[in-house]
Image: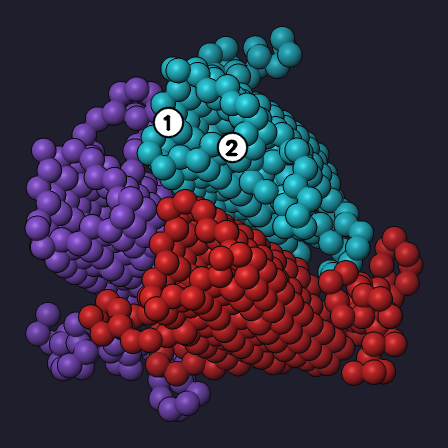
Chain colours: A cyan, B red, C purple
């Protein structure tokens, strides 16, 4: 059974499986594969050569179960994406090219994931999270709302690799992790904190603190860091950065009062 | 000449070249390209949009030679893979998505290579090696049996880049290299050793030693590190980790006695 | 309107848009998409499943403008590339697989970009630049002629992430940045300098200097570093390395006199 809107645009060489729903104004570019049990909501774009609802391990054991994959409304998934079955992505998702999202992951609304980033299974990503290019998010990571991960950040989860038990990282809301940083297993990154570029974070980061280095050490309170163009405090970043955020019109101060 | 089993499943828009053998129960998903001189053995899966037996440089010089590519039995190569001609992969290979394996490389049996990993030419990878996501393995690297490379590890080979002579890395059996580590040219990583996450390894690592930092320094004997869940020594890891290993049933102690 | 040479080879399942020029002896491999307003010059190869002239953000706002993409003569773009509209690449370009080049970027002649590398928008890359695998080049980066970036180098641009103003990196000619290094926003890497593997470069690097570490510190003049095979100074590298360079026949000394 398929439920494909007459108002959807399906380009050439697209393969669509069974039990698929494609709502109005969806655009699926050429060469894409929509596997079984996929729902693509109104107004979303699926870039060329993407695979949505990708097979889990049970397929290869000849025991393919039903794994639902839901893509929220008004999402833009650029070409080459691979999104597994048993993934739910909420509305207004935006991605670069060739992202990978493994089974069991839950992605909030207004999330952005950059080119080549790889989200491992059972990850939980909150609303308005921005993940840049080439990021690796290990299995079972928890990323709260409004977190930023910059290019090539690596989030690990196995304290004694290889082992059978993992110890996931948790990144609390409004935290910002700069490019190329590595977060070690079990680490909790506090709210409003900043991890400087190229850091290796081996222990918890206190709320509002800036850390840097290998191993990362406390440098100062994040709110002591100034924007060199404006001379004003750069953190908490929400007072300065509005693009795409829910406080885009009112400003953060007004918005947080009402939330 | 092609030798394609009637018991193979070939999906839509698959292109198959000359002098190709596809054995029983092989599954080739849509959009894949099997170039000339490829052998895919019994029971293997080739994911969508993969290229097997990819052109070497001679193709672009108008001088395309015969380069054989062999995929061993019961392998699972997930979508978007690019595996060059003149590559031999033994049985039970498993890969994530969009791996690249360059010409001249030899891959042992029961090897796993994760999403986006890039194995450069003339690499030699032993049996039961596990390479996670986003790893870079430089040209001519030698990786012995039962080695682990975790996400985003980079293995270099040029001591004075750019130069004409390379100095490959050798990683000895049972070694474990944690996420984001960089191994410098010519370094030998000893048997049973552990490289901590985010390390930059500039000199040889002694057998059984744990090193960490930039530059990496000796921290302790690996067998002093405990698994925080069980309280027992975490290394050598083979006494604790069995999944997918040949000692899965008997345990490492019994297995090593018989090997 | 399309202007496709009868001497071009176009393989199966290639989609070609409007206002496209494909010159003599171009080869476009199967599954590729050539969007509108693309010019592919004489003798170039476009690998399978590539997208040339990819959509910019305006496409998704229903306001698709004309963005020209030009691929220079005798280029080899290997499979899976995504090159945006509003990109100009000069002659003799060579790439690995799955590269990404974003809109507004300008790429000189005889440039090489390795597998999985991601060049962000508005980057300027000079002539004879060699970028290896898995490199990230942030928005507005300036890379002068004859620069080398080795595997997994990350070039950042936002001093207080996330912010609205960026501070691009500039890498001066003949500089060499070894594997896994991270260059912080606004940093200027001097001519003939060397950044050692795994460095995090937080401030400008003086001309001819070698730096290493996290944070990177001056180690010595680059010309004090010897090639261990020959015993001679390894830098400036141009005296030792000629392959693919314009001084390949005459040697650097002769060539630089005439330039």
Q: Is residue C43 left or right of residue B187?
A: left
Front residue of this view, candidates A58 and B80: A58
Q: Residues within 10 Å of mark 2 (few under 14, many from 20)?
A: some
Q: Is residue A169 above or below residue B120?
A: above
Q: Residue furthest front?
A: B6
Q: Is residue A77 above or below residue B209?
A: above
Query: Is residue C136 in view?
Result: no
Image quarter of residue B202 = bottom right
Image coords of residue A151 (percent x, y): 49, 45
Q: CA distance from mark 2 to mark 1?
A: 13 Å
* Residue holding disc 1: A10
Image quarter of residue C132 = bottom left
Q: Is residue C136 above or below residue A244?
A: below
Marks 2 and 1, the one that precedes in the sequence: 1
Tell me which residue sits at (84%, 66%) in the image. B249
Of marks 2 and 1, the one in the foreground = 2
Q: Any mark on residue A17, and which?
A: 2
Q: Residue furthest top?
A: A258
Query: Is residue B28 in view?
Result: yes
């Amino acid at each position: 059974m398929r439920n494909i809107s007459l108002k959807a645009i399906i380009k050439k060489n697209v393969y669509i499986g069974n039990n698929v729903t494609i709502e109005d104004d969806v655009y699926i570019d050429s060469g894409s594969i929509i596997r079984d049990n996929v729902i693509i909501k109104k107004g979303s774009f699926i870039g060329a050569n993407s695979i949505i609802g990708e097979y889990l391990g049970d397929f290869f054991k000849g025991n393919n179960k039903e794994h639902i994959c839901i893509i929220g409304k008004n999402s833009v998934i650029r070409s080459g994406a691979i999104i597994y079955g048993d993934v739910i992505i909420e509305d207004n998702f935006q991605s670069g090219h060739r992202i990978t999202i493994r089974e069991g992951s839950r992605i909030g609304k207004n999330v952005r994931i950059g080119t080549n980033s790889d989200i491992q299974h059972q990850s939980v990503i909150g609303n308005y999270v921005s993940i840049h290019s080439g990021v690796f998010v290990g299995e079972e990571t928890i990323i709260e709302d409004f977190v930023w991960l910059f290019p090539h950040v690596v989030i690990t989860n196995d304290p004694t690799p290889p082992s059978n038990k993992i110890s996931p990282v948790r990144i609390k809301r409004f935290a910002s992790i700069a490019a190329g940083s590595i977060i070690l297993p079990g680490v909790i990154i506090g709210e409003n904190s900043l991890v400087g570029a190229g850091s290796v974070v081996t222990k918890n980061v206190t709320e509002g603190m800036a850390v840097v280095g290998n191993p990362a050490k406390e440098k100062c309170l994040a709110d002591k860091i100034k924007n060199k163009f404006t001379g004003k405090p750069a953190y908490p970043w929400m007072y300065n950065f509005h693009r795409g955020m829910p406080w885009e019109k009112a400003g953060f101060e007004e918005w947080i009062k009402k939330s």
